[in-house]
Image (cartoon, grey):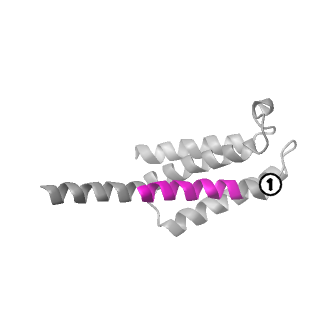
Amino acid sequence: MVSRILFACIMLGVSVLFLMQSPPTPGAFQFPHADKIVHFGLFFVLAASFHIAFRPPLWFAWTSLFVYAVAIELIQHYIPGRGADPWDVVADMVGVAAFYAVRKVLLYLLATRKRRRQSSS
């Protein structure tokens, strides 16, 4: 239950950040494509919290987060001072992919460690 509340809070926070009339602290990003790193990081966290809260099948998680990413960009197109950028969707989905890749590697390492302990006992 707590994980679902946390996911809802993260989802709300991400939505507010992406839908503000102007990006927060525009001078904070001093290098090209810094916003893509923000998209990557926010969707990494969003994918992690979504997975922890609901344990959805992989296809459902990917589809849901992709639809959300596209919807955010379409809405931003109509917000003064913002714009839609398809590369933001790419950065979002790379963040999702990174979460699931990290998860897979960690599960593999934990399983390997468990097998080693069992074989040495």
Q: Position of residue 93 (x, y in %)?
A: 63, 58
Q: Residues within 10 Å of mark 1 (few under 14, many from 20)?
A: few
Q: Is residue 58 above or below residue 24?
A: below
At horizontal 64% and vertical 49% (from top left) the residue drawn is 40
- Viewed as shown, does residue 86 lie left or right of 100? right
Q: Nearer the viewer, residue 15 or 120?
A: 120
* Predominant SS of the magenta segment: helix
Position of 96 relative to 80 (above/below): below
| Foreground pick, 44 / 67 | 44
Task: Find disc 1 in the rendering and name its residue.
Answer: 85
The picture places residue 109, in percent across and down from the top left corner, at 35, 55
Q: What range is drawn magenta here?
A: 90-105
Q: Residue furthest bottom?
A: 59
**Looking at the image, is 42 positioned above or below residue 84?**
above
- Is residue 91 toward the left or the right of residue 64 in the image? right
Which quadrant is the C terminus positioned in? bottom left
Looking at the picture, which amino acid does disc 1 mark? Asp
- Is residue 102 shown in magenta? yes
Q: Residue visible at 25% across and 56% down?
A: 114
Q: Based on the displayed image, in which of its 4 quarters is residue 70 positioned? A: bottom right
For label 1, the SS is: loop
Q: Residue 62, how many percent across, how many down?
A: 57, 64
